Amino acid sequence: MLASSLFVIANVDVVAQAGANGSVTTFGSVTVTEVGATTANVSGSVDPGGTDTTAWFAYGVNDTGSLDSTTMVQDLGGGTALVSISASITGLIPDTTYYVQPVAENSAIITYGPVASFMTGGSNTLSNPPADHWAVPAYTFTPVNDHQYRVGQTLPACWRWGRNGTFVARASAPHCLAHEVAATNRAQREERLPAIVLPRNFAALSAPEQSLVLVDIERVSRGETPVLGVSASVNVFAQLGARANADPSLPGDSGVAGATYAWAANYAGAVSPLDANYEWMYTDGWDGKLTFNYDCTGPHAQGCWGHRDNILADANWMPCNESSCSIVMGAGYVRNGAGDGFSSYTELFVQVSGVMPTLYYTWNQAVAAGAKA
């Protein structure tokens, strides 16, 4: 019931170069997205200028010399309009700056487009557990305890019996919150981290505010800088994802003040923000048939622990191409939106630089109310 996205976007300008027989080969913007530790997606466009043309991307780590690695050649035809080209690049080195450039060739000449740069993420291997930590006490239904219950039988603490033998989530039940915290603390101990301390007013906070508290407890306890706060303008896009039961996304024209358009997103069907956080942080890896993360398709798949990586994103995982960057967030919530009694929860982390969007709830407020990592 999990999905995640990480986008780091670099755009460069349109350029035009002379082609065969006086024609002009025009290159559109180059965009690099979904940058991970060893992979990236690159796209662009080329106008063949009326001459049959092929194109590919060249990439490498040396911006002053030749880019010695190339993607597959794509046939663009001989039209006079921009034609999209794209490629997935694999086998990259973590924490490394790469340069990528579109290249076009016709019968007479090879032309080179603009160069874009991007930095691969850190491998994050030290921050990821060797295996899933299934919740103990088991406060909700998971692949570990998802068996047939007889009507009237005791259910996990965050559920109760409804009419006609149905299950009803009850996230506000006192034992639910206590068991969620106990399970989280047990998982924290496995990583030799201190017990979490929620702010005194945690139960009265909104879902986005609770999400910020939990994110920053996870981050600060591991030595990361906190997400600064919750922005209503980012909530708008996070809520769209919650309504669609999918990762939210940040459009290029979002209007979020200071956004660099590097962002990351998580989705989960859960009973509460604490439950969603537990799924993202502690049951996000490969566990065979019990695997909870749809993006984790094998023991070494790139999607394993992707939600956790998004929560713990730092300057390496979400590279800053400005003089300095910070992270703000928004969160979405739809009650019972995920079906079977589970609600939809989303998080959208946005990198900002310079101008800051208005934040209506911050980590400093949580700390003032007693939160500790």
Image (cartoon, rainbow, N blue to C red):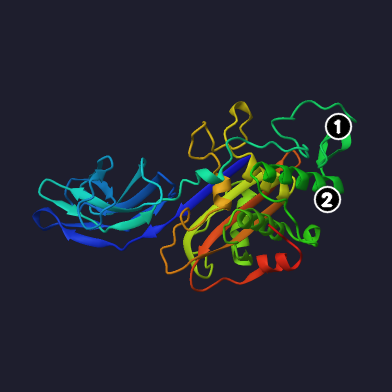
Which residue in the protein does label 1 denote? 165
Quarter of the figure with residue 89: top left
User: In what element is the residue under mark 2?
Assistant: loop
Horizontal placement of 274 versus 57: left or right? Answer: right
In front of the other: 131 or 305: 131
User: Which residue is more in the foreground, 336 or 354?
Assistant: 354
The residue that appears at 54% across and 48% down in the rendered structure is 309
Instruction: Tell me the kind of residue under disc 2.
Output: Ser
Dot 1: what SS? helix
| Image vertical order of residue 91 relative to residue 242, above or below | above
**Residue most extreme to the front:** 192
Image quarter of the N terminus: top right
Cβ–Cβ under 8 Å for marks 1 and 2: no
Q: Residue furthest bottom?
A: 355
Graded by Cα atoms within 10 Å as few (under 14), some (14 to 19) or many (20 or more), the crowding at tag 2 reads few
Amino acid at pointer 1: Gly
145 above or below 93? above
Q: Percent x, y for residue 365?
A: 71, 68
Numbered badge on residue 125? none
Look at mark 2 in the image and give the residue it sits on: 172
Q: Nearer the viewer, residue 334 or 92?
A: 92
Q: Quadrant location of the C terminus? A: bottom right
How many numbered callouts? 2
The answer to whether residue 330 shows anywhere in this view is yes
How many angstroms separate mark 1 from mark 2 (CA)?
A: 21 Å
Residue 113 point in image, percent of width and height: 24, 56
